[in-house]
Image (cartoon, rainbow, N blue to C red):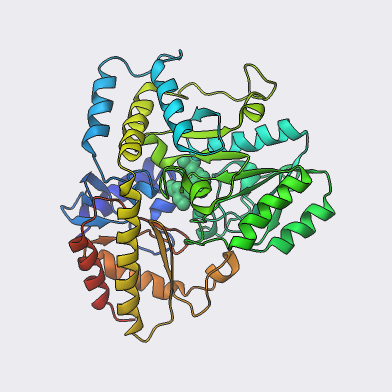
Amino acid sequence: MIYKRSSALFAEAKQFIPGGVNSPVRAFKAVGGDPIFVKEAKGAYLYDEDGNKLIDYISSWGPLILGHAYEPVINAVIDKAKKGTSFGMPTEIETQLAKLAVSMVPNIDKIRFVNSGTEACMSAVRLARGYTRKDKIIKFAGCYHGHSDSFLIQAGSGAVTFGSPNSPGVTQGTAKDTLLAAYNDLDAVRTLTKANKGEIAAIIIEPVAGNMGCIVPTDDFIHGLRELCTEEGIVLIFDEVMTGFRLAKGGAQEVLGVMADIVTFGKVIGGGLPVGAFAARTEIMDYLAPDGPVYQAGTLSGNPLAMSAGLAMLTELNNNPEVFKSLANKTEYLHKGLKKVLSDKDVAFQINRFGSMLSVHFTDTPVVDFETSAKGNNELFKKYFHGMLAQGIYLPPSAFESYFLNDALSYQDLDDTIAALENIKF
Ligand code: KE4
């Protein structure tokens, strides 16, 4: 594979954009080398600026669950754009998407649209604090809820890669209200709630984690969290930016059988355009301005183009729920194939999987939290990443990420991916 034009474009981008990218994880810092500049994409395939065709396993970090340039979504956006792009006034399509999302997801009555997952999670925490009149939150090491100050404490995803899980610029005043626990460690949460009795507004969690690789909660942990929050009057926030409308119509709440108090969304809900959202029962959501005291706003929130992409995407998923099973089957097939190949090589590895999320870790320790995820051998991961890329397989450029399969992937694509791994010498 030749990447000359991507490298030239990256050199130029760095003159005008910090680090040459608009989101750090795209810069390949965790794996080395220059990032790939994509020209266009269709279905399961990326076409880069050097004319290479790549099988895509990040699907824009989750949104493109049905594949790139999915006709119904593209047509909806084109039709809407011809009637104007933004008005700063309410439009019917916002209500249409809100009604559909509320009908698909359990335990929510109302939803507020924003422009990113970060905004959704940031707003959800403010709402929880306003609703409970308490200040502190508990998050989990390795979970990533976007780049709002309160969350950049032992954050996952790109924040880990850049060794700045506690980013400069986050004040002590902010950091003191964010308490940390290890994922899957209910005792740690109990200890924190006891030591901060009556002061904790919310616990925010990725119900299936995807920012330290893919990590599945134990039943005891996730059900125990729900019970603890109910007992202590703490708002349980499920950050479903990754899992929402990906694991099932009703996301992780449906699949795990655990109801959160506030749920945040992003990625799939926007069909590839910038949409985030947060939702809850009426009694909580009505605390939001303009009817309630908790302020939250956005010029492009509910943008008609973004709403049209989201409505087309969720309509497809709502009408064809078998896609979730199809995706889970493909992910299981890929898991089994990769496991078989790696088992025949002299390398320690773990493969975590849930629904259409998967991650590969080069360690002999089961990966159940940030600490065990960080034990992965990154040199082996780099060899894996670049070895696969050289054969036209585009994987997440960091061990602290998850694969997001799209349903445009064929079983031939999966076989080609498994075969490519055969050629890598560890
Ligand atoms: P955004 O602000 O990037 O739309 O969403 C933040 C966010 C919130 N919650 C979860 C569970 C998330 O995974 C994310 C963002 N995910 C990363 C991928 N790990 C986005 C990729 C990037 O940062 O460029």
Instruction: Residue at 47%, 75% (x, y): give it.
Output: 377
Relative side of 31 to 291, left or right: left
Quarter of the figure that contains the N terminus = bottom left
- Judging depth in this view, the residue of 313 and 48 nearest the camera is 313
Relative side of 407 to 277, left or right: left
Q: How many numbered circles does the render carry?
A: 0
Instruction: Residue at 50%, 33% (x, y): give it.
Output: 277
- Residue 35 in sight from this viewpoint: no
Check the image and report above or below for 403 versus 277.
below
Check the image and report above or below for 117 versus 102.
below
Relative side of 378 to 273, left or right: right
Check the image and report above or below for 40 versus 277.
below
Query: In the figure, residue 328 lies in which quadrant?
Result: bottom left
Instruction: Residue at 63%, 55% (x, y): give it.
Output: 223
Can you give x and y, in whole percent of width and height, for residue 147 in the image? 55, 44
Can you give x and y, in whole percent of width and height, for residue 414 in the image? 24, 64
- Residue 424 in sight from this viewpoint: yes
- Judging depth in this view, the residue of 171 and 9 nearest the camera is 171
Query: In the figure, residue 12 lies in which quadrant?
Result: top left
Check the image and report above or below for 86 versus 335.
above
Quarter of the figure that contains the C terminus = bottom left
Can you give x and y, in whole percent of width and height, for residue 332 in the image? 34, 65
Can you give x and y, in whole percent of width and height, for residue 55 in the image? 24, 57
